[in-house]
Amino acid sequence: MSSSKKQKIVTNCYKVVLLLDLYIGSKIKALRLQKKISQSQLCDNFMNRVVLSRIENNKALPSLEQLIRISERLEVPLSYFISDVKYDKLIEYADNSSSVISDLFNSQNYYEIVKLIEYNYDEFLKAQDLNKYCYAGASFFNIGLYNDALKYLKKYVNLFLKSKEDIQKLNIDNFCQALNILFKIMLKNHNYEKGIYYLELAKKYLYEFDSLNHSICFIIHNNLAYLYLNTNQFQKVINLLENFINTHDNFIYVRAMPHIYMSLNIACYNVGDYDKSIKYIEKAILLFKFFDDEYDAGRCHLNYINSLRYSGNFDKAFEVVNRCKDEYKKYNKLYLSFFIQEMILYFNIRNYEKVKEISSNIEVHQLSEMSEHNYEFMIGHIKYLHNDFNGAYGLFKKCEKYFLTQYYYRDLLLLYDDLYNMTKDISYKAKQNEIMNKNGRKNIVMIHC
């Protein structure tokens, strides 16, 4: 094909594109996010990022040259941006948009819902269905367009709250699904306070309408417990989940239960109720094994070892560690985590030679983030005890920030004590005083080693 003919085809395609100005930007953005390409990466050296941002937000159209370069970077033909526009489907939407939106959402055709909104927004508005805003918000969320998702989900929540009680009862599941997606968006932004607000609102209406056996109710409780754990509200986790499981007579969503028991385990050993923490983690392990979820059962064993250690049952903890090192060899990072747990056990009984012996067989770069920082902390303290201050200082500085983000205050108290004794820098004493009475999470240190 001649270059002039190719150019003619491209030009004709672009004329059609010009008619779809709302569609182009959204599709570029969705595809870029789907491929996990940043705006800067997509722009490269041929476009300013501000220009791309305007295009993706439907405030400007790309030039022909820009669209060609974008299609090349996203590894799709230029026709990708117009080829799946079906005008007959858009006409069908106008005839029966309410049921079409529901059907599309239930079949996970999220892009089709977004296309409907972009092309036929007036028809979308005409649909006599409160849930259309929920479906729209969830669709935008599922293709990675979080700002658009927020707009529609908030609209849906506000309309639900203004609706009559019979309408609310009918749509309680979608309402809670919308709030749960809002929680996920807040989680991405590390806005735990707002995430808790949305989940507690969902919980309020679930209890009000006696909908505790709905599957979404299990999800809401599990996610709310997760946020409470991340904000160190351990007693709230216990109150929330124990009340939930003690008042249930029909566990319709059983697959959520091992996760709920895991959350209870973590909360209980952080408040010092080790008998309960052991009971709950044993239940979680049994359920994960029942569902043939070997990996999560292995993760539970890490918590099981922690609970045994904090309860003072070191013999049992060592027994579980040794069994798990044989049982979980095929999951490399998980497998290595059991060696770190073994180091922690020896660290707390001050058998530092054994800690060093185990550490010498570990390739640090293969560890998970948490295991790597725990490794650095323990070896750092041992180096400090052997007057290798340079080595200790370097390792402590590597794990300090992570420990702060995880609220491992017991570990940090020892870390700052070592740093002060090495450097005589009074700022480390000030840091100790700042976290001395804070309610943090337990990790390695049980008592001052």
Image (spheres, rainbow, N blue to C red):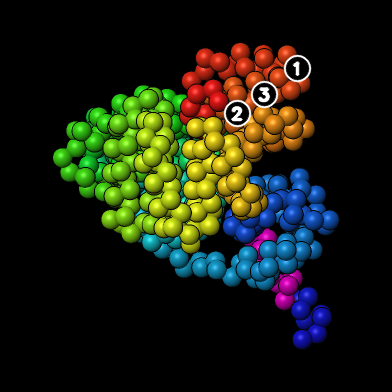
The three-letter amino acid code for the residue at tag 2 is: Leu
Q: Nearer the viewer, mark 1 or mark 3?
A: 3
Residue 100 in sight in this render: no
Write down the residue under mark 3: 418
- Prevailing secondary structure of the magenta residues: helix
> Which residue does the image show at 48% across and 38% down from the upper left?
345
Q: Looking at the picture, tell me which residue is in the foreground, 188 or 404.
A: 404
Residue extent of the magenta highlight: 9-20
Using residue 147 as the reference point, say whether residue 251 is left or right of it: left
Q: Position of residue 426 (x, y in %)?
A: 73, 14
The local secondary structure at tag 1 comes to: loop
Q: Nearer the viewer, mark 3 or mark 2?
A: 3
Tell me, for residue 283, which label it has, or none.
none
> Which residue does the image show at 82% across and 80% down from the upper left?
4
In the picture as drawn, the residue positioned furthest to the right comes out as: 45
Query: Magenta stretch containing residue 18, yes or no?
Result: yes
Mark 2 vs mark 1: which is more N-terminal? 2
Mark 1 vs mark 3: which is more N-terminal? 3
Using residue 317 as the reference point, say whether residue 427 is left or right of it: right
Residue 88 in sight in this render: yes
Mark 3 vs mark 2: which is more N-terminal? 2
- Mark-to-mark CA distance, 3 and 2: 16 Å
Write down the residue under mark 1: 425
Q: Nearer the viewer, mark 2 or mark 1?
A: 1
Q: Looking at the picture, tell me which residue is in the foreground, 94 or 146.
A: 146
The three-letter amino acid code for the residue at tag 3 is: Asp
The local secondary structure at tag 3 comes to: helix
Tell me, for residue 404, which label it has, or none.
2
In the picture as drawn, the residue positioned furthest to the bottom comes out as: 1
- Location of the C terminus by quadrant is top right
How crowded is the residue under tag 1: few (<14 C-alpha within 10 Å), some, or many (20+)?
few
